[in-house]
Amino acid sequence: MALPVPGSPLYLRNDLPGLVMAAVSEVTSNTKAPFDLALMAALTAGSIALQGAVDVQAPTGVRTPVSIMTFALAESGERKTAVEKHFLSGLRTFQGEQKEKYRKEMADWKLNQEAWSDSLKAKKRALSRKGADREEFLEILKEMSAEVPIEPTSPTFLYDDTTISALLQRMHEGSKNAALVSSEGGTIFKGHAFRSLPVLNSLWSGSDCSIERSTTGSIEIVDGRLTISVSVQPGVMREFIERKGDEARDIGFWARALIFTPISTQGARFEFGGKPGHDAMERFNERIIELLRLSVDDDTQGFVRQVITFEESLEPYWLAICNAIEREINQGGRFENMKDHASKLADNIARVAALISCLEYGLGHPIRREALDAAISICMYCSDNFSRLFNALPQPIQDAETLLAWLGRFSLRGIRYMKKNRIMQYGPSCVRKKSRLDAALDWLVISRKLVVGRYEKTSYVDLMPWAQYEPYRMMQEVAYGY
């Protein structure tokens, strides 16, 4: 099996069932926001709803949570908040209902607690008057302790722009399934939210967390799950990477992340009239609430998660995916400079496939080929974004992207055919050596971004390989120096 080539567009199969795609397309149409942002928000909502109810098991037997960490690099004005509002509305509605129920339970608990306290005081006074000995006192206190009213736990699972310390404390005290969500992540990256990166790694992996503190006491989170979704301006992200990038990458934080870099729609968000539809999002949020009910009410009571598996027939395909990733770690491969990322890539593919499968079909079905293919496309798109963010692409691919940007200036001017020697003479400095130019062109040909041809003794590059071949135009442009 071959992985999608670097630079491949984000692609979801047309035969993927309609719930996720319909919701993403509807929100994209209504808000005019980038498709990538809407897709990220849909996966985030699925992760929050499902992380308490299911785990996923790969065909190799490895079982992991379905929680994901997503980051979108988007400038201000991309309507991130509007997209989030659509996809998180079901979650916020459900949380609001749970909070109202919690307030009533707390009011009852306070009355019961006060009554219990009064009863305890009365029994203590009676024992004192009676002159009871120490053993009798202890026996009565044990009986009363067994009857102490249990304080309800907070149902809050959705947190906006909070600190990790506060989030962990609330997970310790209340819901063990939580989400940190921010459509304007500048405050998170500039603040202290990401000081506890090892703890975030543990939660992503599904490991128990124990934090000892000398002043506020210890925090213990057993079987917890955490979804993270942050949209941030590219400049803020670059600043954070400069400050803590090495540390965050060395401990594997960024290797676990799915990074989205949506292409801006600003300047093309034209209105054509018509009333926006909401049917798809209504169905999507109904599914989200349905999934939430499977776990939220019981996540502090030792709820056993259902394990989502793949169709048995997909085992050879899955092994081919894992082996393809492993091969690309070798020298000259796609993941040569990002082995950390490659080590978590199959894990993320399994998680995204499980999210899509459960959102589309529910929990009673194994993961099908179309959900797995969609997950591969999404995760490889995020992989390309990771490599660009950390400049981790192998040299031929970096050169190819630089060359493609330079050639784009000519194609915009209507020039289609260019002599290879002209690129070596006037092109980017990185490809003025024949060996590096050949390697870059090979990548671009494999990616179907251009075609290399030969006319008589002259090699040339076709900048518009999708268009019908034009031999007369080729001879003219090559003959006149392009």
Image: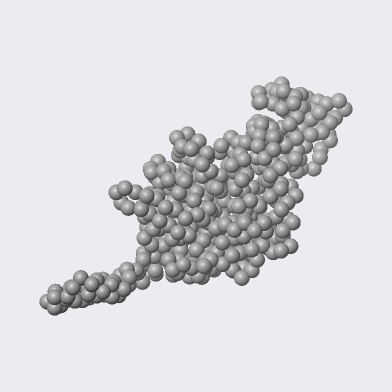
Q: Nearer the viewer, residue 379 or 150?
A: 150
Image-based side of 124 in relation to 189, left or right: left
Q: How many numbered badges does the structure rendering display? A: 0
Q: Quadrant of residue 107?
A: bottom left
Work out which residue is located at the far top of the displayed protein and give it: 425
Q: Is residue 42 left or right of residue 186?
A: right
The answer to whether residue 181 is left or right of residue 102 is right
Q: Residue at x 77, y 32 (%)?
A: 461
User: Image height check: is 253 above or below 456?
Assistant: below
Q: Residue at x 55, y 47 (%)?
A: 256
Figure quadrant of the C terminus: top right
Q: Residue furthest right?
A: 456
Image position, residue 158 (x, y; %): 42, 59
Query: Is residue 378 visible to the viewer in this orientation of the structure?
Result: no
* 3 shown above or below 438: below
In front of the other: 284 or 180? 180
Residue 234: % across, % down: 49, 40
Whether residue 127 sits left or right of residue 40 in the image: it is left
Q: Position of residue 75 (x, y in %)?
A: 48, 43
The answer to whether residue 50 is seen in the rendering is: yes
The colour scheme used here is one colour
Question: What is the x, y in percent for residue 382?
Answer: 59, 47
- Please tell me which residue lies in front, 47 or 416: 47
Q: Residue at x 66, y 62 (%)?
A: 310
Residue at the far left in the pictured view = 129
- Name the residue rendered at 56%, 38% in the picture: 389
- Residue 279 sits in quarter: bottom right
Determine whether 301 is above or below 482 in the image: below
